[in-house]
Image: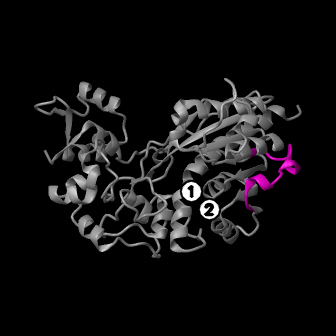
Amino acid sequence: MKDYVSLSEASEILGKSKETLRRWDREGKLSAVREPMSNYRLYKKDQLRLFSDFVFAKSVKPISNFVPVENEYTAIELFAGAGGLAVGLEKAGIKCVALNEIDKWACQTLRKNRPNWNVLEGDVRSYDFSDYRNKVDLVTGGFPCQAFSYAGKKLGLDDARGTLFYEFARVVKEVNPIICIGENVRGLLSHQNGKTLEGMISILEEIGYNVMPVQVLKAINYKVPQKRERLILVGIRKDVNLKYEYPLPDNRIYTLKDALKKGELFDKDVPDSLGSSYPKSKKDVLDLVPPKGYWRDLPLDIQKEFMGGSFYLTGGKTGMARRIGWDEPCLTLTCSPAQKQTERCHPDETRPFTVREYARIQTFPDDWSFAGSVAQQYKQIGNAVPVNLGREVGYSIVKFLNEHYNLVKPK
């Protein structure tokens, strides 16, 4: 049944849980057919494409999280990468007074674009931030997801030694900011059956921070034309009696066309730039895939040859041999655009996105240049927090800090 996909594949295509799709089927919102022998739910591809066009339709009333800055707010950013979050915070009105990053090419990128930024290159373990104590409002960091060794039921700071989260918590303890924000992949929710996240929360509480309910923010809801998700961990210093509110999701979903063409997101078409290419064997296969299509749209014999052993495994694998459509958001960008099994092919040409197209999909401004080889540039962009997501989170922090300083202002 080549024209149909499974419940699992439909879930991946639409970015909705299987349970949501089952409910929509019961409600008649998105009806499935039943496979004759197994009674499994199946969805017609054309039906999904029409439905996704409806889901991604433009809204007439966009949501704004913008708030004006009422004071000068400062931040220290750890694991800063190529500056996606820092640029987003800057756009929201928050000034980064120090940025730490170990990758030399990312550091060159930061210095190249913002010569006035204080870029601390090297291992975070070699830096002491005590001079900033009580002088900085915010500490942020996209620390990697690493397992802890558990010494007891409730994890303390010492139990996290050797991990980069320990360094994040150490810097927070040294600086004592009003608010700290960690960001990570969605997988942190289930890492070590949730124990890693529990440990992080207990450590932040031990060093004097109340942790807000953790949320996973979908970039497509924050003016980013890409299906990327980031887990946000927010700690509020315990002497601050104020609730933090996450940024409101927009009701307008931006598409690849919004990223690469002149429109609401950018005032001109994407500039030309260097980019990778596919080897001939992969190009010959992807030539056969239509926009918004993927490996299931190939002839059966080519499917089996291209997918190898993966052909017989369960799951949709909808990112494989995938050609993105103009009228949908891009799938999450990877660090290497031509790597096997995570193809994000241009809609009209059989090639990966160029460096500047990558940057647009991550909502970097066109004048933000990247240092190093083309491969290094792709890696920096693929690892970044989307700038517009950083800006929207920045607005929520500005709102929080405005309220805090108004409360503590002398009467």
Q: Which of marks 1 and 2 is nearer the N terminus?
A: 2
Three-letter code for the amino acid on which mark 1 is drawn: Ala
Closer to the camera, 257 or 40? 40
Q: Mark 2 points at which residue?
A: 82
Determine the residue positioned at 41% across, 66% down.
Answer: 353
Give the vertical position of 95 relative to 407 (above or below).
Answer: below
Could you say where residue 205 lies in the image, as x and y percent from the top left? 73, 29
Q: Can residue 293 be seen in this view?
A: no
Looking at the picture, tell me which residue is in the foreground, 408 or 320: 320
Q: Which residue is disc 1 drawn over?
A: 384
Query: Is 294 a magenta residue?
Result: no
Quadrant of the rendered structure where residue 377 is? Answer: bottom right
> Mark 1 and mark 2: span between their CA atoms?
6 Å
- Residue at 81%, 29% (x, y): give it: 239
Q: Is residue 187 left or right of residue 151?
A: left
Q: What stretch is highlighted in magenta?
A: 121-138
Q: Which amino acid does label 2 sit on?
A: Ala
Answer above or below: position of 221 versus 366: above
Colour scheme employed for the rendering of this structure: one colour
Q: Is mark 2 on a helix, strand or loop?
A: loop
Check if mark 1's residue and mark 2's residue have beta carbons within 8 Å: yes
Residue 94 location (% of width, % of height): 71, 51
